[in-house]
Structure formats: structure tokens, C-alpha cells
């Protein structure tokens, strides 16, 4: 994606409808996030951009293509490692959105002083995400056997993935 109209910017409350349009199908599918698939709109939006999460949105000048959040993975002695979550708009999948968001997240993490990025619970059947993370220097440092109940495939593994910054 080499579009001069692309902009990654902080999410605001004015983005709620666009953000929910991306989150709802992903959360309802129940196959990649360890959240209740029946999560309410308000709770989902609050989870994505609330607490210690700092959320960003990728726009192309016409529509929102994806979003991510970044936050400390732990408190205290673990606060130098960040965690992120990513979502791509349904009609923007396969267009390099996640890659652009990851590039931004890595830069943002470094600028915030994080020393590493960790994904705590990557569902192993989410092969596109696993491949993207691995192609960008993330190692699988842990496997949680049967830790995720997939709606179609039953109990599947979850991966812990890690990268130094």
C-alpha cells in the first residue's frame, strides 16, 4: 500500500462507528480474540481504547481500514514490554493493512521507550497473523496447548510471541 492519502492517527470518540464496524465482525466470529463474542458495543469500544490502551486508526481519506492498540504488557518490572491488538476492516483484508499498522506500532513502541513487544495469546489457527508476526521478527516463545476454544475447531493452541525492539 503506497497511497499518499493513508494516515495513521489516534482514535477519538468520533471514530466509534467506524471502529465498531471493524471490531464487531471480528469479535462476533470468536475465532481470534479471547473475548466474549456477545460483547456489547460499549464494552468492546471501551476495551479497545480504554485503560492503558492507546488506540490508532488507519484511514485512506475515504474510509477506515484498520486499527490497533498499544499498552504496557504488565505493570512495574514488566512495563518495559508492550502488547498490541490489531483489527482490519473486512473489505480491506489482504491489502497490507496489518503490515502498515505493525510498522507503526513498532515505531510507536520504540518512541514510548518500550524494549520489546509481546503478543500474549495468538490463536494458532490464525495462520495469517502468525506468519506476519514471524516475518517481522517475532519468535514463538511459548505454546499454550488447547488454551483457546475455537467456535469451529474446538480447543486449539494459543501462542506467546515476542520480539526485542
Image (spheres, helix red, strand yellow):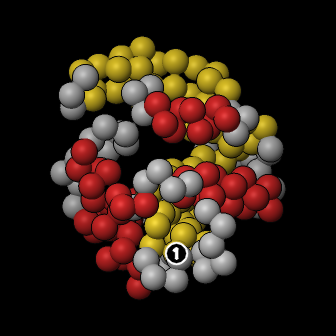
Q: Residue at x 34, y 27 (%)?
A: 148
Q: Is residue 122 above or below residue 73?
A: above
Q: Residue at x 56, y 54 (%)?
A: 96
Residue 155, horizontal then vertical, whole percent: 29, 19
Give neighbour class at mark 1: few <14, some 14-19, many 20+ (Cα, 10 Å): some
85 displayed left or right of 117: left
Q: Is residue 130 above or below residue 12?
A: above
- Of 77 and 162, the residue lying toward us: 162
Residue that protrudes farthest toward the front in the picture = 2
- Of 111 and 22, the residue lying toward us: 22
- Of 102 and 74, the residue lying toward us: 102
Residue 48, horizontal then vertical, whole percent: 43, 61
Residue 73, horizontal then vertical, whole percent: 61, 45
Q: Is residue 148 above or below residue 91?
A: above
85 displayed left or right of 33: right
Report which quarter residue 111 is drawn in.
bottom right
21 displayed left or right of 107: left
Total labels: the figure holds 1
Report which quarter residue 135 is drawn in.
top right
Report which quarter residue 40 is drawn in.
bottom left
- For the N terminus, the image quarter is bottom right
* Mark 1, secondary structure of its residue: strand
- For the C terminus, the image quarter is top right
Residue that protrudes farthest toward the top in the picture = 145
Residue beneath disc 1: 59
Q: Is residue 117 visible?
A: yes
Q: Residue at x 25, y 23 (%)?
A: 153
Q: Is residue 87 visible?
A: no
Q: Is residue 58 above or below residue 95?
A: below
Residue 102, horizontal then vertical, whole percent: 63, 52
Q: Residue at x 42, y 14 (%)?
A: 145
Amino acid at each position: 500500500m503506497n497511497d499518499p492519502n493513508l494516515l495513521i492517527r489516534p482514535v477519538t470518540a468520533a471514530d466509534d462507528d467506524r471502529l465498531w464496524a471493524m471490531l464487531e465482525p471480528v469479535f462476533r466470529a470468536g475465532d481470534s480474540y479471547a473475548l466474549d463474542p456477545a460483547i456489547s458495543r460499549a464494552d468492546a469500544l471501551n476495551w479497545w481504547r480504554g485503560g492503558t490502551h492507546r488506540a490508532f486508526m488507519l484511514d485512506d481519506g475515504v474510509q477506515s481500514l484498520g486499527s490497533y492498540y498499544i499498552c504496557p504488557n504488565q505493570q512495574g518490572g514488566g512495563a518495559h514490554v508492550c502488547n498490541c491488538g490489531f483489527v482490519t476492516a473486512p473489505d480491506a483484508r489482504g491489502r497490507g493493512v496489518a503490515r502498515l499498522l505493525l510498522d507503526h506500532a513498532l515505531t510507536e513502541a520504540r518512541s514510548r521507550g518500550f524494549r520489546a513487544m509481546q503478543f500474549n495469546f495468538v490463536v494458532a489457527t490464525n495462520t495469517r497473523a502468525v506468519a506476519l508476526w514471524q516475518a517481522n521478527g517475532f519468535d514463538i516463545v511459548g505454546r499454550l496447548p488447547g488454551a483457546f476454544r475455537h467456535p469451529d475447531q474446538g480447543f486449539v493452541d494459543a501462542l506467546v510471541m515476542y520480539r526485542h525492539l
